[in-house]
Image (tube, helix red, strand yellow):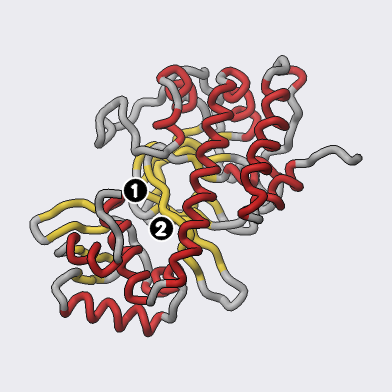
Amino acid sequence: MSPLRLTDIADLLAVPEAAPVALLCWALLWLPDLCQPPSMLRTAHVRIPFDDMRPRKPGRALPSPPHPHGTATWPHGTLLARLDAEARADLLGIGVPRRMSPGEILILQGSEESHLVLLRRGLAKVTASLPNGRTTLLAIRFGGDLVGEMSALDGKPRSATVTACGTALVNVIPLEQFKLFLRRHPDAALELVAMVADRLRWSNHRRTEFTYPARVRVARILAELAHTHGRRTRDGIVVDVHLTQQELATACGTAGTTVEKILRELRADGLVDTDYRRITVRDLPGLYAVSRLDPET
């Protein structure tokens, strides 16, 4: 019997029914490696498209502006929120800090790189180019999230593009540094598996929503973005994620003209206002009603 490879696990992850087995296999494959001395760790050639890669001592967090939710609290579900205080400080202290400008690409689809990016502050959107030339929105990542883990696991080209939605502070982490981090904190490997499992579950949930009418799907995307990434102002809740109308359409699985019509109806109903790549939700409970979502869940 041939040995199990990371590429085999990556293929299993694409099959919802096999995903739990794939995640367990991934953990079993990595954890023995993490228990070896540093000299015995498997090596990998990492090409980082950032210069000035100065090594830093692990365990010393880089200075950053105060976190909007408090110095010790990160958004629920992010990797930093899952880690204990010691592991969190260690992860924040490795890699190279970068300040990304709005619209700047953190990870490019198709590139053959294996570094990871830790979002310390700001928002980023994950998109993928489709064969028909369209771009679809896959997810939104925010402070505390880790991106680029799939290529780090299977060595394949990037499957999506990650773009800063505004000014963002990140740590660019070479794969070898991340492996050493996991060796110092074995529990962090299990939390990484849990994070990947949550993302897979969210992806499966998103697939089931295509059974709803387009108006409901659009309202669901907008309500979720307002809930997770909204900024409350006098005019309503501003969604600080700069999306094109086409990205919103592909995320909802409908045509751009359909999304344009639905947004026009939502504006007429007083639920939202739209501007260039910005949406303000004026009536969140009303939007939840259209989306058929329970705001308490």
**Is residue 51 found left or right of 71 in the rendered image?**
right
Q: Residue at x 61, y 54 (%)?
A: 16
- Of residues 104 and 139, which is closer to you in this image? 139
**Is residue 9 found left or right of 250 in the rendered image?**
right
Classify mark 2: residues with Cα within 10 Å, few (<14), some (14-19) or many (20+).
some
Q: Residue at x 34, y 52 (%)?
A: 166
Classify mark 1: residues with Cα within 10 Å, few (<14), some (14-19) or many (20+).
some
Q: Are marks 2 and 1 in contact (CB under 8 Å)?
A: no
Residue 277 lies in quadrant:
bottom left
Residue 208 position, x and y percent, is 48, 64
Q: Secondary structure at mark 1?
A: loop
Q: Residue at x 40, y 72 (%)?
A: 212
Residue 289 position, x and y percent, is 23, 66
- Do we see residue 47 in this rendering? no
- Of residues 152 and 213, which is closer to you in this image? 213
- Of residues 256 and 53, which is closer to you in this image? 256
Residue pointed to by mark 2: 103
Amino acid found under the numbered disc labelled 2: Gly
Work out which quarter of the rendered image holds the N terminus and state it: top right
Amino acid found under the numbered disc labelled 1: Thr
Q: Vertical placement of 92 versus 275: above or below? A: above
Q: Residue at x 72, y 32 (%)?
A: 29
Q: CA distance from mark 2 to mark 1?
A: 9 Å
Residue pointed to by mark 1: 167
**Is residue 257 found left or right of 292 in the rendered image?**
right
